[in-house]
Each structure stands twice: as structure tokens, then as C-alpha cells.
Image: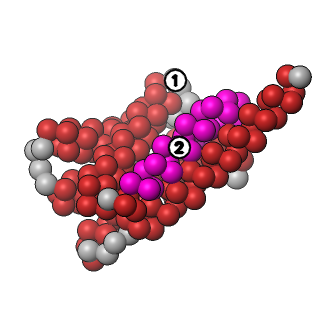
Amino acid sequence: MKKSVDSIKPWRRSTAWWVLLIEGLIAAGLGLSILFQPTQAQGWVLLFLAIVLATHGLLVLLSFLMGRRQGNFPLIRGAVALIIGMAAILMSMFGFSDRLTIAWMLAVGLLVTGAMALLAPFIETSDRERRSGFLMAVFLLVLGGLLFYNVLAGADVLQILAWVLLIFGVALIGYGVVARNRAGNDGS
């Protein structure tokens, strides 16, 4: 489990307290905005998911360029995630399409990228590193599944996402405050 968390955010072990506080405030703020303004928040949620997808693709490509991944598979999966994520970002910024089309594109992109991330440890890494990408694959598949279900059924999964973000944000804020107090006590 620790390897999975480290593979998603390898810098997390030595994260400064104020970074945790900012991440918590952003997550809690996004959760609150979804709860209180769900219609306007739909566009922000789609943009957030597009940024997650594009960032994942960029990180996979950088990992490939740095020699941590083997073969052409990371190049393909990184490019797919980056292209779909960037296309969704540009489409939403410049109004090329409606939210439903962007949501469909992101749902398919997240599901495809998540499935490829499940296969990736068996194709592009050594035996000892196979479990490291599992958490990210599950994360992408859950996001893609929720978005796909939301588009297909018209269900309001934004409320679920809002509460998850709010709880996660409050937990990060609390952890940031505790980390700050520890840092203050260690420095005294």
C-alpha cells in the first residue's frame, strides 16, 4: 500500500504542512461549491477530471523519458491520457463542445487509461514494482465509472463526489495543522 501511495505522490513523504493545508482547502472548497452550486460546478468537475487525466498522462510520459518505464506501452498510455485530457481542457475553455460530449470523452478516456494502468505493471516494470500502480489504476477506473454512470443514467453522483472531497479536504486540513504543530515542536 505504501508503494502505491508513493507511486502516485512520491513527494508526499516530505510534504510541507502548508502544502497539505492548501490541498485540503482546495478539496474542501471544491466540495462545498459542488454542494451549493451543483449546476455551475459541473463544468469545474469536468475540468478537474480533465486536469487529472492530462496530469496522469504527462507523469507517465515523463517517467518513460526518464527511463523508469520499459517498452512502448507507457508512451501509448501516456499519450492517450494526455491527448484526451488536453482536448477536454481546450474544449471546455474555448467552448468547442457541450458538457455532455466532454463528459462522454472524459469517461471513456478515464476508463481506457485506468484499464491500461491495470495492465501497465505487467508490461512496463520489473516484478518488484508491479503493485505500485494499482491504486492509481483503481482511482482512474472509479472516476471513469462514476462519470460514465452519471452520463448514462443521469444520476447525481456529483453529490457523492462533493462529500468525498469535503471529507478529504477537512482531513488534509487537520493533518496539515497537526504537521505544523509537530514541526513547531521539533524546532523548539
Q: Does residue 33 appear left or right of residue 64 in this picture?
A: left
Is 28 located above or below residue 35 in the figure? above
Q: Quadrant of the C terminus?
A: top right
Q: Position of residue 53 (x, y in %)?
A: 38, 45
Sooner in the amino-acid sequence: mark 1 or mark 2: 2
Classify residue 134 as left or right of residue 98.
right
What SS does tag 2 mark? helix
Residue at the spot of label 1: 66
Q: Residue at x 64, y 52 (%)?
A: 171
Locate residue 160 relative to residue 6 in the image: left or right: left
Q: Nearer the viewer, residue 146 or 17?
A: 17
Please state which amino acid type lies under the numbered disc 2.
Leu
Question: Percent from the top left, x then y, of residue 16?
Answer: 67, 29
Give me the disc on residue 25.
2
Residue 132 placement, left or right of 124: right
- Of residue 146 and residue 48, the one placed in the foreground of this image is 48
| Amino acid type, residue under disc 1 in the picture | Met
Residue 14 figure quarter: top right
- 149 up-or-down from 88: above or below: below
Task: Please state the extent of the stretch shown in magenta in the rendering.
Answer: 7-33
Q: For this rendering, which residue is in front, 177 or 98?
A: 177
Q: Is residue 126 above or below residue 107?
A: above
